[in-house]
Every structure is written in C-alpha cells, then in structure tokens.
Image (cartoon, helix red, strand yellow):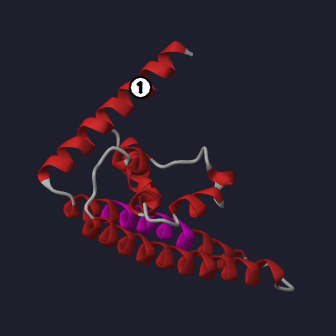
Amino acid sequence: MKLSTLMFTAAVVAAATASAPVIADTGRHADKQHAGKAMHAGRQGPLQHLLADIDLQPEQKSQIKQLMQQYRAEMRAAKTASREQMQTLMQADNFDEQQARLLLQQQQDNRVERQLSRIKLRHQILQILNDEQRQQVKTNAAKRWQNKAAARHSS
C-alpha cells in the first residue's frame, strides 16, 4: 500500500473520532444538543457510524467524552495559533517570503501531528471498549467499507 494511501486512510479513520461525543452523550439533553447541530447533520465521521450500534456503558461514555473534549481543546488552540501567525504575515507592510515558507512548512508539520493525534485518540477510544465491542466496531467498519465500495461501483 502506498504511503500516501496509508496516511489518508489513517487520517480518515482518526478524523472520525471527532464525532464520538455525540454518540457518547445520550443523556436527557442529547436531543437539544443534536437539534442545535442540524447544519452539520449530514457530516458524520466514520467513528460515529462505527460506535452507533455499540452499547456503551456510562463509564465508557464518560471516558470517551473526556478524551474528545481534551482533543478538541488541543486542536482548537493549535488552529488559533496557526491562524494568528498567518494573519500577522498577511498584514505585514512587506511580504516576507522566507517567513511564509517557514509558516507553510510549520503548517504541514502540524497537519502530520494532527493526524497522529487523531490516530492516538482513536486508539485510546478503542482501548476503552471491551473485546466484544471492538469486534463489533471491526464488523461495522467492514460493512461500511463494503457499502461505500458498492456505491462507488454503481455510480
């Protein structure tokens, strides 16, 4: 498998973890929280689909929610810092190509770090699940990939 394909696959799998708290939060306010996200209704990550049929215990839900909150806070902070650096560069009186190249390289390095963080997060979430739940995740993933492949070939 090509490295780029492997990296893309890892990124897609890891990105899915960003949706896990929606599944983890099935409390009395879950419907209200979901209603506020109607704009994003069609955008569900693969992990959300994988965990949709998994019967999580309250402790598991809590642990996943905590991991997701921590992950989101870290990603938000990194994104804000990167945006501020780019704004400073763009608003400068003179364009500094060397600084722009450095910033672009940093952004590329940050993308790799974000992908790695997503992979770690997915691993941490999977470690919270018991063996039966992990097997169900594998089964769900296989079904999802088969459905996607069938949809691509029928188009």
Highlighted range, magenta: 105-120
92 or 148: nearer the viewer: 148
Position of residue 82 measured from the top left corner of the image (x, y, whole percent)? 61, 77
Q: Magenta residues: mostly which secondary structure? A: helix
Identify residue for label 1: 147
Left or right, residue 109 beside residue 40: left
* Left or right, residue 2 beside residue 134: right
Tell me what residue is drawn at x 49 percent, y 21 percent: 151
Residue 8 seen? no
Q: In this view of the protein, which residue sits in the foreground, 116 or 91?
A: 116
Q: Is residue 89 magenta?
A: no
Q: Residue at x 15, y 56 (%)?
A: 130
Around disc 1, counting alpha carbons within 10 Å, would you say few (fewer than 14), some (14 to 19), or many (20 or more)? few
Residue type at mark 1 is Asn
- Looking at the image, the residue that sits furthest to the left is 131
Q: Quadrant of the N terminus?
A: top left
* Viewport quadrant of the C terminus: top right
The answer to whether 89 is drawn above or below residue 47 in the figure is: below
> Residue 117: image x %, image y %?
38, 67
Residue at the farthest top position:
154
